[in-house]
Image (spheres, rainbow, N blue to C red):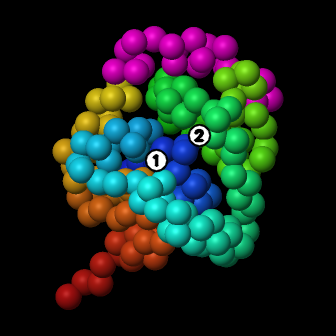
Amino acid sequence: MSATIEFYFDFQSPYSYLAHSQLGTLGAPVRLVPISVLPLMKLVNNTPTTITCPVKRTYAGKDLGRWAARYGVQVIPPAREKMDGDLLLRVATAAQDEATRAAVVATIFNAVWGGQGDPSPAGLEATLAARGLPAADLIAAAGQEATAATLAAATEAAAERGMFGAPTIFVGDEMFFGNDRLDFVRESLAPKEMA
């Protein structure tokens, strides 16, 4: 049996969306772990340079287009002022079983970056319900203090584990940062030759 991949992500990260689109090609079970990337970066003294550096932000837009074409997905930048990124993460956190979480995460990523639904607070319930998910229950659970505490604890644990951004993938204790490290993930998952 192959190792389980741990996939740490934030819906506001387009590279998390790109990496998520390829998880099914890795041939291993995946545990999805939502984290709040900006608080994570603050914990480890990292700087979100695509926010602070206009030149890098311009380049990143072109880079996203290249990766989207390579993966065969579309990237439609969201109206960030209409999004509540923390709510989206708490909804994913509220999905306790892996199958429901997988469906919730795919639905939210596709709404945020793929133009398939409305991820805003006003449209989220309908977007989730359209995929047959228990939208009202998930949104209610997302509003509970325990859910916010679980998300905060996952973010703090990510910092303690050495993470500094999203997406981050673990295979065992081996860490891989970014959607452009998926070939290294595949190599790590490959059976080792017997000496």
Q: Residue at image x 19%, y 45%?
A: 160
Mark closer to the chain start, 2 or 1: 1
Picture quarter with the N terminus: bottom left
Residue 120 location (% of width, % of height): 69, 29
- Start and end of the magenta stretch? 126-149
How far separated are the C-alphas under marks 2 and 1?
A: 10 Å
Residue 146 location (% of width, % of height): 37, 14
Residue 49 location (% of width, % of height): 42, 60
Q: In the displayed structure, would residue 88 be above or below residue 27?
A: above
Q: In the displayed structure, would residue 57 be above or below residue 59?
A: above
Picture quarter with the C terminus: bottom left
User: Within 10 Å of the Cα at label 2, are there few (<14), some (14-19), or many (20+) other Cα atoms?
Assistant: many
Q: Nearer the viewer, residue 169 or 24?
A: 169
User: Within 10 Å of the Cα at label 1, are there few (<14), some (14-19), or many (20+) other Cα atoms?
Assistant: many
Which amino acid does the dot numbered 2 rest on? Val
Name the dominant secondary structure of the magenta segment: helix
Q: In the displayed structure, would residue 68 be above or below residue 115?
A: below
Would residue 128 appear left or right of 189 to someone viewing this image? right
The residue carrying mark 2 is 105
Q: Is residue 103 at least partly visible in the picture?
A: no
The residue carrying mark 1 is 9
Q: Are marks 2 and 1 in contact (CB under 8 Å)?
A: yes
Q: Which mark is residue 160?
A: none
Q: Is residue 195 magenta?
A: no
Q: Residue at image x 51%, y 13%?
A: 143
